[in-house]
Amino acid sequence: MRKNIIYTIVVGIILYFSMNKKMRDKGVTTIKKWIDVIRNSESFPIEEAGVPEVDNIENAKMVDEGSQFGVEYYNRIKEGE
């Protein structure tokens, strides 16, 4: 249901920008600028995914300690076999 609403809004925006040439050219220019910004950005969120938050170090420690749960569980299961 939510996807249908988003698709409808996107199509509406595209149709609105394509109504006249001036608006269409402005929309194309804006999209090209966004694409250039994305391509030229120096860091992507995936590159920063493993970097802990420095503003709240307690949460970073908690996440770091909790991340071993899956590994320890796997090791216990393997040892039991």
Image (spheres, helix red, strand yellow):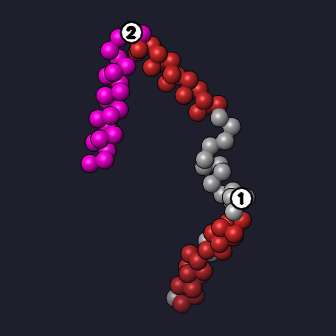
Amino acid residing under circle 1: Asp
Residue at horizontal 66 percent and vertical 51 percent from the top: 48
Image spot of residue 69 (x, y percent): 58, 77
| Closest to the observer, 20 or 64 | 20
Residue at horizontal 51 percent and vertical 18 percent from the top: 29
Q: Quadrant of residue 52?
A: bottom right
Label for residue 55? 1
Task: Check the image and name the residue furthest to the front.
Answer: 55
Q: Secondary structure at mark 2?
A: helix
Query: Is residue 62 left or right of 70 when viewed as pictured?
Result: right
Our reading of the magenta stretch's main secondary structure is helix
Q: Which residues are magenta?
A: 1-22
Task: Check the image and name the residue furthest to the bottom.
Answer: 80
Residue at horizontal 31 percent and vertical 37 percent from the top: 7
Image spot of residue 64 (x, y percent): 66, 70
From where the camera sits, is residue 11 visible? yes
Image spot of residue 50 (x, y percent): 66, 57
| Closest to the observer, 77 or 39 | 39
Image spot of residue 72 (x, y percent): 60, 80
Q: How many marks?
A: 2
| Closest to the observer, 56 or 34 | 56
29 within the magenta span? no
Residue at horizontal 38 percent and vertical 9 percent from the top: 21
The answer to whether 21 is drawn above or below residue 47 in the figure is above
Residue marked by disc 2: 21
Task: Check the image and name the residue furthest to the top.
Answer: 21
Amino acid residing under circle 2: Lys
9 within the magenta span? yes
